[in-house]
Image (tube, rainbow, N blue to C red):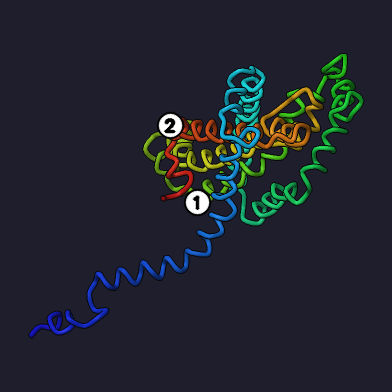
Amino acid sequence: MSAYAMTAGKPGAGPAHRISRDTMRRGVLLAPALLLVIGLVVLPGLWLLALSFIEKGHFSFAHYERMLTYSSYYRILIATFRISLVVTLICIVLGFPVAYLMAQLPARLAVVLTVLVILPLWTSVLVRTYAWLVLLTDGGPINRLLLSSGLIQTPLKLLFNETGTVIGMVHVMLPFFILPVYSAVRSFDWSLMQAAASLGAPPRSAFWRVFVPLALPGVAAGSVLVLVQCLGFFVTPAVLGGGNVTMASMKIASNIQQYFDWGAASAFGVVLLLATLGLLLIAGRFVSLNRVLGPA
């Protein structure tokens, strides 16, 4: 009698039983994390979704009908996505060269530059926003420098508009873009560039056809991270916008603080969430989100 036949009848000897035990073990290990996600993400999300359909204690679509009726909601939503996309594009233009430089530097200098990139994250967003409030005034250092250099004749209006809001948001979001890109670029095999050069590719062609495609997942990860955070930004637009710039988070806050209307705030939050998911689906047609977010 073979060894497999001798052990087939014993409990726990079959491969199906071993798979079941492994599945149970993984389930037990994942249970605390799943409970945490359900308690902190899923249940509050479902609660807000339920509130969006409640009007004066009854089930109603009144909050969604109001958003379809009043054009102010459209303007706020469009402004939110427009400002977020502009901030993301500026972060790409400014952050990609910094990440590329960090990957080219020796290890010690790269560590120093990484610390300088992370350093603003150790300061409160509110403090950094009020610092920009001083820098961007008509008599602030930026306008004085431009006036003394002769580049402008009158002070630029950099405060209480979208310009000041974008500047402040870029300053806050730039580290969140640089770090994922640097992580992707640092693991790049630079011998591929040498191989491309040995095959006759000019440096510019090797950069765009070899380096950039392989760095694209890091760029996409940083862009998604910046864009999603910008869509929910509150402090910087509220301070630097001066009431002239209204983003979705500010409208949600006003619905709760001024009108105590949790239903309207929840409905607008649900619409913003669906719009964000739609934008991610569109981006997924051009860049694989599996490469950005990791395998499922």
Q: Can residue 97 be seen in this view?
A: no
Residue under numbered circle 2: 286
Q: Under tag 1, what secondary structure?
A: loop
Q: Do the residues labelled 2 and 1 touch (CB within 8 Å)?
A: no
Q: Position of residue 43 (x, y in %)?
A: 56, 50
**Residue beneath disc 1:** 187
Q: Note whether 6 is above or below 208 in the view shown.
A: below
Q: Give the image quarter of residue 273.
A: top right
Question: In the figure, is residue 125 to the left or right of 227?
Answer: right
| Left or right relative to 239: residue 230 | left
Q: Where is residue 25 in the image (x, y as percent from the top left)?
A: 40, 70
Pick the residue in front: 191 or 47: 47
Give the Cα distance between marks 2 and 1. Answer: 23 Å
Q: Nearer the viewer, residue 161 or 15?
A: 15
For the residue marked with disc 1, what is the amino acid? Ser
Q: Which corner quadrant of the image does residue 15 belong to? A: bottom left
Q: Which mark is residue 29?
A: none
User: Residue at the spot x=74%, y=29% of the render?
Assistant: 165
**Mark found first going from the N terminus, 2 or 1:** 1
Image location (x, y in percent) of residue 95 = 63, 38
Which residue sits furthest right? 139
Location of residue 53 with respect to 12 vertically, above or below: above
Quarter of image, res 243: top right
- Residue type pointed to by label 2: Phe
Left or right of 219? Residue 175 is right
**Which of label 2 and label 1 is nearer to you?**
2
